[in-house]
Amino acid sequence: MKIDIIRSTDSWAAMQQEWDELLQKSHLNLPFLTFAFQQAWWQHQGGGEWQNAELYIITGRGEDGALLGIAPLFRVEGQLYLIGSHEIADYLDFIARPQDLDDFVRAVLGAIKADENSAQLTLYNLLDESKTIESVKAAVQAAGLTVSEETLQPCPYIALPESFDAYLESLDSKQAHELRRKMRKAARNVLPVSTELVSEASELDQALDDFFGLMTQEEDKLKFLTPAMRAQMEAIARAAFAGGWLQLVFLKVGRQRAAAYMNFDYDNRIWGYNAGFSNAHAQLSPGWLMMAEMMQRSIEDKKTVFDFMRGDEEYKYRFGAVNRYVKKLTIGR
């Protein structure tokens, strides 16, 4: 396998089509690994999380020049990380077909070992189902490197059934009863309660302004959403919208947008990315209503999974989620 290291954005941009084509065949097809997401992250470098980062994308090609593997990395002061590390992208990984992954991992580790300016590789947010974990463990000894593994966070998800009634039946009986009660209450509200999916490019600017306005009604998210981080989040949203996989859903009370979820509708799954809620309509339990709407919509659209991604917030389990985890591998000399 021929290894190259991409250090310039121009060379990276030229890979866009083959990058995404390989991702569709990869052992894990994740929205955070799309060229669009990765490029949006790099332009803002995690909302200012990283300083003095330099591009260090390792690619592997076959004898015929076909792209077989991508390690989307950057380097800071001798430390290598996956692009997207580690707050903005919930899941990260190498990109390769299952049958090419072991060879590619060995080649990547060999290239890093040969580079005296790269002291350590840290792989954040690898799903526990990722084949990369075992590939790295198998390859480090031959490469003369070491590896340590750490479990970071749970990532609750729901395998969706064939009908919304079946979904409700899968919940704890008290939870299902309370959800139905809140839905009936919303239906009787003086002002009509409805949902809105943003689908037109002309609506996106105002929709994003409203979404971020809802986010900042929570104190923690107000602190998180610095100007640099807002620019980062907006770039990601616009990249996902251009790619056709942004799901920006609002709950409206009358004409007012009272709650919102920004999700990714990608690879027949819904990936719940972020949310915001108006304090003015707390009595309607907008979080419950939004979850009910999104579950029903996802099931009707034949999605296979609703992925809440990182975090062990209690509401995720109330709505039927079960855990998987993300891990961190640290590879050193």
Image (cartoon, helix red, strand yellow):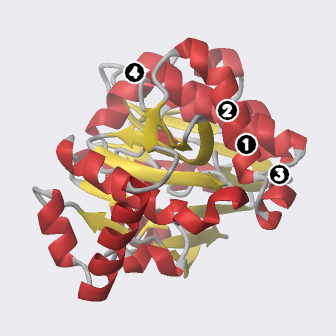
Evaluate if marks 1 and 2 touch, with contact meaning CB atoms under 8 Å apart. yes
Gap in angstroms between the C-alphas marked 1 and 2: 6 Å
Taking the image as shown, residue 152 lies to the left or right of residue 218, namely left
| Tag 2 residue | 208
Locate residue 325, reporting x and y percent: 44, 75
Front label number (1 vs 3): 1
Q: Nearer the viewer, residue 220 or 203?
A: 203
Mark 3 residue crowding within 10 angstroms, few (<14) / some (14–19) / many (20+): some
| Tag 3 residue | 49
Q: From where the camera sits, is residue 5 visible?
A: no
Evaluate if marks 2 and 4 touch, with contact meaning CB atoms under 8 Å apart. no
Hey, what amino acid is under mark 1? Phe
Q: Quadrant of the N terminus?
A: top left
Q: Residue at x 62, y 56 (%)?
A: 113
Q: Residue at x 26, y 52 (%)?
A: 296
Gap in angstroms between the C-alphas marked 4 and 3: 29 Å
| Tag 4 residue | 18
Q: Residue at x 85, y 45 (%)?
A: 48
Q: Which residue is the extreme one toward the front? A: 190
**Label located before the other in sequence (4 or 3):** 4
Hey, what amino acid is under mark 2? Leu
Gap in angstroms between the C-alphas marked 1 and 4: 34 Å
| Tag 1 residue | 212
